[in-house]
Image: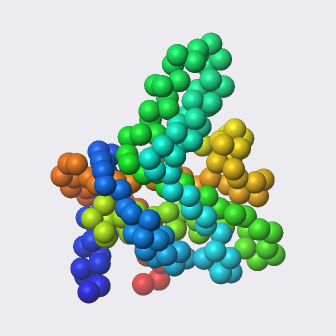
Amino acid sequence: MSKDFLRFMRDRVSRNQLSEPAPSKEEWFDILDAASRAADHGSLKPWRFKVFSGSGREQVGQVYWQHAKSEVPELTDDKAETFIKKAFRAPAILLVYADIVHHPKVPEFEQLMAASAAAQQALLGLDALGYGGIWRTGPAVFTDSAKDLFDLNDNQQVVGLIYAGTPTQTPNRVADTGLEERLSFVDL
């Protein structure tokens, strides 16, 4: 089993060509229940999830549009569709965010990393059920207007957006990771 799981992890790749179907509500529950087993110093469970599908993706599109208008004020409303349709590149979008609490032993950074670990687990869960996903976030979601549109409070912070659905293309094999250049052992 362990070798099979390692092979599964090695074979996982981000999928940017995604179509219907997306996971059902029951499948999302299974995926996110498994993702909620992520590493978590202090057992704070800081991760939170919102799934946008169908017309709900319009809310994510509004985040892109509001950011574009703030960056380029001369954009007119007739350009909105260009930015809003970015949220429709997949049948579902998973928003992962952290609900940060003050803790004497678990700094904010570790709580964000725990939520990031849950996001990675969600990607593995998507693949395990035959779906695919890609972590596709960008600067638009880290703005105050995005927090407002996502209905997040001051102690909640976006970790990422995961676009999810059924892969439409055979993935390219991941090239050698170059691990030899990124790994060192001390006193082994």
Check the image and name the residue furthest to the front: 55
Q: Residue 133: x percent and y percent?
A: 37, 55
Tell me which residue sits at (67%, 54%) in the image: 157
Quadrant of the image containing the C terminus: bottom left
Camera-nearest residue between 50 and 71: 50
Q: In this picture, is 7 found above or below 88?
A: below
Question: Relative to residue 111, is residue 18 drawn left or right?
Answer: left
Tell me which residue sits at (71%, 57%) in the image: 156
Q: Would you identify the image quadrant in which residue 111 lies?
A: bottom right
Camera-nearest residue between 69 and 55: 55
Tell me which residue sits at (69%, 38%) in the image: 145
Check the image and name the residue furthest to the bottom: 1
Q: Would you identify the image quadrant in which residue 115 lies?
A: bottom right
Q: Residue 144: x percent and y percent?
A: 72, 41
Quadrant of the image containing the N terminus: bottom left
Q: Residue 3: x percent and y percent?
A: 25, 82
Task: Please say whether residue 121 is visible from this viewpoint.
Answer: no
Question: Relative to residue 129, is residue 152 drawn left or right?
Answer: right
Q: Residue 73: x percent and y percent?
A: 65, 17
Tell me which residue sits at (44%, 47%) in the image: 54
Check the image and name the residue furthest to the left: 170
Question: Relative to residue 37, is residue 175 drawn left or right?
Answer: left
Question: Relative to residue 133, is residue 105 drawn left or right?
Answer: right
